[in-house]
Image (cartoon, rainbow, N blue to C red):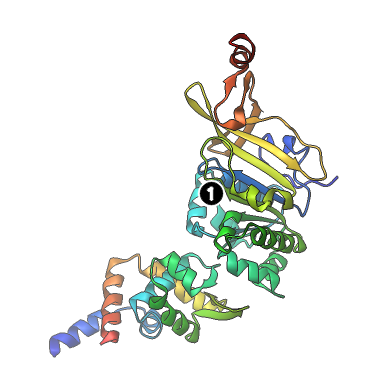
Amino acid sequence: MEREDLVGRLMADIDPELLEFLRTRVNSFVKWDLIRFFGENPHTTDTAENIARYAGRNPEAIQAALAELATQGVLTENRLGEMTVYSLTSNPEVRRLVHQFLEATNDRQFRIKAIYHIIRGMR
Amino acid sequence: MERVKTGITGLDEMLRGGLLPQTATLVEGAPGTGKTTLGMQFIYHGIVDYGEPGIILTFEQFPSQFYRDAANFGWDFRRLEEEGKLRVVMTSPEVSFADLQAVEGQIEVLAREMGARRILVDSLSHFQRLTQDPLRLRHLAYTFINGLKREGLTAILTWESPVLLGQPTEGYEAGIPFIIDTYILLRYVEIESSVHKALLVLKMRGSDHDKDIRQFDITPRGIEVHSRFEGHEGIMSGSARRMADSFIQAFVRR
């Protein structure tokens, strides 16, 4: 129990803003992938099916994650004719967090901590 | 007459000064012939040399690939995006088609906000994903191109030719060359066991243009169009012959 607390404290040693972003928005590996995709390709607008193709995933795997990211304000969801399309939010504050998160993932220690939080959140 | 300069050495001369404003140019060629490079160069020079912001619409290549490829030519696309002079938009033919038809769609808003004057669509041949019917494809491409013109954009649209050497093309079947204003062909040519690249302006609606088949290279600075092929014929067949050989073949060996 004590050991778990110690690990928990070590793993919480992340910028509080990023930790919150991790816990509330990047709370699955599929979402991590999608946030990275939209962060690297910020002017993408497309359907879940096409985004799945770009991300090398099957559409069923990402449909729910896209919808959740839209609800959480990371993406915007729009109707275009009969299609539902997703793009990165234009909210500068969220865009800054996405950018900050992607920058942070270049650091191995951060990645380990982020994976820890995502797995804990999945339990 | 006002011209939209591509900024590509040799090409503007072939186009009698540049493309006509608010027209659509199809650049057709096999993989690696330089279609996307030509389009990127058109966008880059537009921004840097002529103060005309640009949009790149990509249906397959990731924007990060564009940034990397452009950087190889010394074109800093990331900086231009940060400065609001360029947008590399990744989307699909079906979404961009519906978007252009919609009022206040992304492309319309983007073009207005940026004051964009140029667009590269890479590539129009992806519209083939939407239909197998050549007539429907022609209708889709026609509507799409008119949407770009409506936004005041001068467009370069690439078309992937599946044939490495010689004559394609699937685009002919759908009549795509008929609905565009300028038609540029890029071809590999085999001459004496060596592969060269050829460029031909096949059509330019509303303007005279150079009819020569010119040799071009992709240099560290981008595409440079040189003088015409001398002493050979059958260039566009992909396998050029010396003119003397053709003469012998035609008259002497009979």
State how many labels appear. 1
Quadrant including the C terminus of chain A:
bottom left
> Which chain is mark 1 on?
B
Of all residues shown, which one is farthest toward the front?
A: B254
Observer able to see residue A101: no
Observer able to see residue B55: yes
Quadrant including the N terminus of chain A:
bottom left
Q: Position of residue A121 (x, y in %)?
A: 29, 86
Q: Residue at x 63, y 35 (%)?
A: B199
What residue does disc 1 label?
Answer: B70
Q: Position of residue B247 (x, y in %)?
A: 63, 14
Give the SS element for disc 1. helix
Q: Amino acid at mark 1?
A: Ala
Of all residues shown, which one is farthest toward the bottom?
A: A1
Picture quadrant of residue A63 = bottom left
Q: Position of residue B178 (x, y in %)?
A: 73, 49
Q: Residue at x 70, y 71 (%)?
A: B101
Horizontal side of B110 relative to B222 (left or right) equals right
Q: Residue at x 83, y 47 (%)?
A: B2
Say above or below: B93 vs B163: below
